[in-house]
Image (cartoon, rainbow, N blue to C red):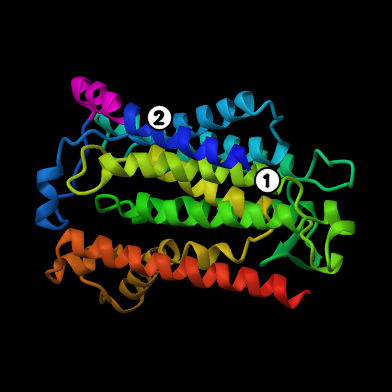
Amino acid sequence: MRQILFSGVIGLFLTLVGTPLLIKLLAKKGYGQYIRDDGPRGHHGKRGTPTMGGIAFILATLIAYALTKVVTASDPSFSGVLVLFLMAGMGLVGFLDDYIKIVKQRSLGLRAKAKMAGQLIVGIAFAVLSLNFADARGQTPASDKLSFTQDFGWSLGPVIFVLWALFMILAMSNGVNLTDGLDGLATGASVMVFGAYTFIGIWQHQESCAYAEALTNPAACFEVRDPLDLAVVASALMGACFGFLWWNTSPAKIFMGDTGSLALGGALAGLAIVSRTELLLALLGGLFVLITMSVVIQVGSFRLTGKRVFRMAPLQHHFELKGWSEVLVVVRFWIIQGMCVIVGLGLFYAGWAAGK
């Protein structure tokens, strides 16, 4: 369990200390945020704020994980490394998008096809690799079955599983990206979900089928390949995002950009897939789902009826245009996300208890 504490503390320290250095570097180079003219007027003052801040917590997470393994003399796991690969790979796609927007002064960033191609390459590589590297018990990092609190139902087969994994990765990446519209909103919400996955990893480790003989009821055990290491990764992400939030909260000194939002979405999807809690992620990350659905509803309504349901989508901007202050929107949305995490963890525990 020391690994979980070390990774979280190291991640927190690195972003607390490293983010202001990144802010100075980005500000010196003039890598500032572009602000839409049709958005809330209060956002116009944010124009020029350094972006691509996701670099800070991506590097902090990778370093925290590596240092934890060195300090505790423990081996990395395939599951943990795959989640980190997915996070870094999606972050790289987001970085290229941010770089073209800001440095090359092309407002739309990467071409849509190029951006999608990058996400598909990273996502497919993760999905294919996660069905390999079986341990001594024959467990691979991911399973080709659907899962809620554990695997259930029939096997999807490798092809359908890859498509399902891609859907999850793209959905969560875009969900976090859409949520990242107000200071600290996406970062704070992500901290809560990574905290939940830290708890889930610890619980799955304690009730792992690898120790089934020592459990009171072996039938209630979890068939997850590397639950403890997933908790280490989740803790590193939670700590790194917490430290970044110090600088990202209102008034933000730095934005995460697509670099950060795509990386966080990838990490969330990766953790859900390898911890066998795929459908549970829709509840644990309920705020991201809610905000994504607001965009889907807005676009669908306008195309079908010519009318808008919200004053502006994503949903957070609708409430800003209704007169809510940015801080009020963020805090209330954090409360919603906190409730989603509480209910999600409650269902996770209930699923385990029901199997006892």
Real-space Cα distance between discs 1 and 2?
Answer: 22 Å
Query: Is any atom of residue 351 visible in this view?
Result: yes
Mark 1: secondary structure: helix
Residue 228: assigned label:
1
Q: Is residue 211 above or below residue 7?
A: below
Identify the amino acid type marked 1.
Leu
**Residue 136 in which image quadrant:** top right
Q: Position of residue 248 (x, y in %)?
A: 27, 43
Q: Nearer the viewer, residue 319 or 238?
A: 238
Sooner in the amino-acid sequence: mark 1 or mark 2: 2
Q: Which residue is mark 2?
A: 14
| Residue 25, magenta (yes or no) | yes
Q: Residue at x 40, y 37 (%)?
A: 259
Specify the quadrant that holds the N terminus: top right
Q: Residue at x 78, y 74 (%)?
A: 356
> Horizontally, is 293 left or right of 145 in the view?
left
Query: Is any atom of residue 121 visible in this view?
Result: no
Mark 2: secondary structure: helix
Q: Position of residue 137 (x, y in %)?
A: 89, 47
Q: Main secondary structure of the magenta part?
A: helix
**Residue 321 in which image quadrant:** bottom left
Identify the amino acid type marked 2.
Leu
Q: Residues within 10 Å of mark 2 (few under 14, many from 20)?
A: many
Q: Residue at x 45, y 65 (%)?
A: 289
| Residue 208, magenta (yes or no) | no
Q: Nearer the viewer, residue 161 or 220?
A: 220
**Magenta-drawn segment:** 19-31
> Horizontally, is 257 left or right of 212 in the view?
left
Q: Is residue 26 above or below residue 91?
A: above
